[in-house]
Amino acid sequence: MDKIKLKSLLVPGDITIKQAMQKLSETQERILFVVNKHERLLGTIMDGDLRRGIIKGCGFGETIECIMKKEFLSIKSDMHGEEEFVTKMMVENKIEQIPVLDNNGVILDVILWTDLLTGKRQSAPSQKLESNQVVIMAGGEGTRLDPFTKIFPKPLIPVGNKPAIEIIMERFYRYGFHKFIYTLNYKKEYLKLFLKENNFPYQIDWIEEKDFLGTAGSLSLLEDKLTDTFFVANCDSILDINFEELLNWHKDHNAAMTIVGCHSEVKIPFGVLQMADGRLEKILEKPVHDVTINTGVYVMEPCMITYLQKGRRMDINELIDIAAGKEKITVYPIYSGWFDLGQWKEYKNSIEKLGGAEAV
């Protein structure tokens, strides 16, 4: 690994979970190496470790020492050239990075799985197509995006040179999910025309609401179509995540529903007064609160549909409240990669992050 890149992945054990999340986001890697002041390797942190820590209740301000893995695989520097051994080690343990240490445990290098493939002829793997369906909720009026939605439906709002729903389908298709069902209502003919006229490599179906059924109610119309684990995605929510890993998380947790939640900072632009027994304790000047926001993307089991009444309006928060006492509902936390197109301010911010502002 490039020395500058390696340095960027070395962190002390006293940084917070929030700082580790930011570091992973900045480096675009999936692992950090926790070292002491002499760069002796103490442990590793992967995005999955952060996710599990948050689920277990670790606060964003806690240090990574509470979640880092202190047991890890490594090789000595004199084994660096033994490519066959290292490759076997990575395959057997299903790891993509392995640190190289000197006799004192100081990290000298990191071998990446992609490094081992350099110079070797690799045939492109055929994409595995998954059978799980993706329901895209596209029937709302999108009033927060007026005046655009007075003319076109919200799912066709442009992101660069493509409408939002085309990008959503592309993101799922990267991981083999190619079966899409749309719930349609407002300006549905525009959407049907768009889906018919484009030669997408997907299976696309739709159902039409007679009335506006809220953010969950239209699922009641799909009871006969959704017989296996399925995704639900709002048409104004773009995620840059591995949907296969999300599905595996859902299965591993034996959940009836998994909600994708993204970390966000809520900044209060005022001094906040903390009081006790009628007396001022202190003033927090412009505090920042760390919260996890519902992204509007879910994985569900068919049993969730049984909590809906066919043709009756229900929003997703109501469905969650009803089912929570009887079913296991979990959260899949992410720390970046969510682009919200639901309001003009968020839309403009998302366009800038996606790099398509100049095309809109």
Image (cartoon, helix red, strand yellow):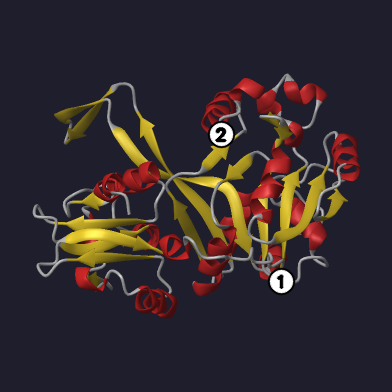
Q: Quadrant of residue 327?
A: bottom right
Q: Residue at x 42, y 80 (%)?
A: 92
Looking at the rendered image, the quarter that the C terminus falls into is top right
For the point 78% across and 32% down, the residue is 153
The residue located at (35%, 29%) in the rendering is 267
Residue designated by label 1: 228
* Number of other residues with Cα within 10 Å of mark 2, as a class: few under 14, some 14 to 19, many 20 or more: few
Q: Residues within 10 Å of mark 1 (few under 14, many from 20)?
A: few
Q: Nearer the viewer, residue 263 or 326?
A: 263
Label 1: state its secondary structure.
Answer: loop
Question: x and y percent of residue 313 in the render?
Answer: 74, 48
Residue 40, horizontal then vertical, whole percent: 13, 61
Q: Is residue 257 left or right of residue 7?
A: right
Which residue is denoted by mark 2 in the rendering? Answer: 354
Viewer-closest of 138 and 166: 166
Tell us which disc is closer to us: 2 or 1: 2
Query: Identity of the amino acid at label 1?
Result: Asp
Using the image, tell me which numbered label, if any, was put on residue 81. Answer: none
Left/right placement of residue 145 relative to residue 22 reads right
State the residue in front, 176 or 154.
Answer: 176
Q: Label 2 is placed on what type of residue?
A: Leu
